[in-house]
Image: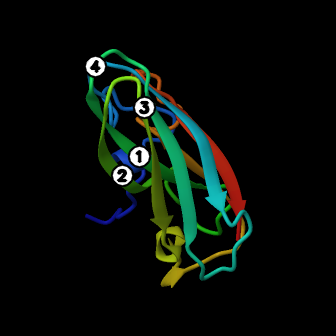
């Protein structure tokens, strides 16, 4: 094998073609809504971690679990990177009609890119939080919120 590029070979590098059943797709007996996505601080030093909080609301009639997923997208990188990358997830049980506030840490290392060595680059990033991948065409019964931050 001479071509080691991952483009077109894994879910992270599909390009314009989306997978039939993307990560996080599945059936649920209820519906969820996401609100109040907070990224702190909105501008951070290159080696700093990002604090993320989001509120998950069970808007359905049944108690259920949701897998909350955080994806990171580099807006401009010096090297090819995935469209987005899963950086955190958590399975959360929420009673019907209730809500819960979740907190996450996105580590600086998770923003690193490979360019002959691991590098942390300055720039603008978008973080997605929800029950599915950003821009997913096969919809799950929840949505994904997004927020931007700068390094």
Q: Secondary structure at mark 2?
A: strand
**Display coloring:** rainbow
**What residue does disc 3 label?**
18
Whether residues under marks 1 and 3 lie with C-beta atoms below 8 angstroms apart, the answer is: no
Q: Distance between the Cα atoms at labels 4 and 3? A: 31 Å
**What residue does disc 1 label?**
69
Left or right: where 54 falls relative to 147: left
Left or right: where 131 falls relative to 41: left
**What residue does disc 4 label?**
62
Indicate which label's residue lies in the foreground, 3 or 2.
2
Q: Nearer the viewer, residue 135 or 107?
A: 107
Question: Mark 1 vs mark 4: which is more N-terminal?
Answer: 4
Q: Residues within 10 Å of mark 1 (few under 14, many from 20)?
A: many
- Residue 83 appears in view: no
- Residue 64, placed above or below residue 1: above
Question: Mark 1 vs mark 3: which is more N-terminal?
Answer: 3
Whether residues under marks 1 and 2 lie with C-beta atoms below 8 angstroms apart, the answer is: yes
Q: Nearer the viewer, residue 36 or 98?
A: 98
x and y percentages locating residue 94 in the rendered image: 33, 35
Question: Mark 4 vs mark 2: which is more N-terminal?
Answer: 4
Q: Distance between the Cα atoms at labels 1 and 2? A: 4 Å
- Residue 50 appears in view: yes
Indicate which label's residue lies in the foreground, 1 or 4.
4
Q: Secondary structure at mark 3?
A: loop
Question: Mark 3 vs mark 2: which is more N-terminal?
Answer: 3
- Residue 54, placed above or below residue 51: above
x and y percentages locating residue 107 in the rendered image: 48, 72
Give the label on residue 89, or none.
2
Left or right: where 54 falls relative to 32: right
Q: Distance between the Cα atoms at labels 4 and 2? A: 22 Å
Q: Nearer the viewer, residue 51 or 57?
A: 57
């Amino acid at each position: 094998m001479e071509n080691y590029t991952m483009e077109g070979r894994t879910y992270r590098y599909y390009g314009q073609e989306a997978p039939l059943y993307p990560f996080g797709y599945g059936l649920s007996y209820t519906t969820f809504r996401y609100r109040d996505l907070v990224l702190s601080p909105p501008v951070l030093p290159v080696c700093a971690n990002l604090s993320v909080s989001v509120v998950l609301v069970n808007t359905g009639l049944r108690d259920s679990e949701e897998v909350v997923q955080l994806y990171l997208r580099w807006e401009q990188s010096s090297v090819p990177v995935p469209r987005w990358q899963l950086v955190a997830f958590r399975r959360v049980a929420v009673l019907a009609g209730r809500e819960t506030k979740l907190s996450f840490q996105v580590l600086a290392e998770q923003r690193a890119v490979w360019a002959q060595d691991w590098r942390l680059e300055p720039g603008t990033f978008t973080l997605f939080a929800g029950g599915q991948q950003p821009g997913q065409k096969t919809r799950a019964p929840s949505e994904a919120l997004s927020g931007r931050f700068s390094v």
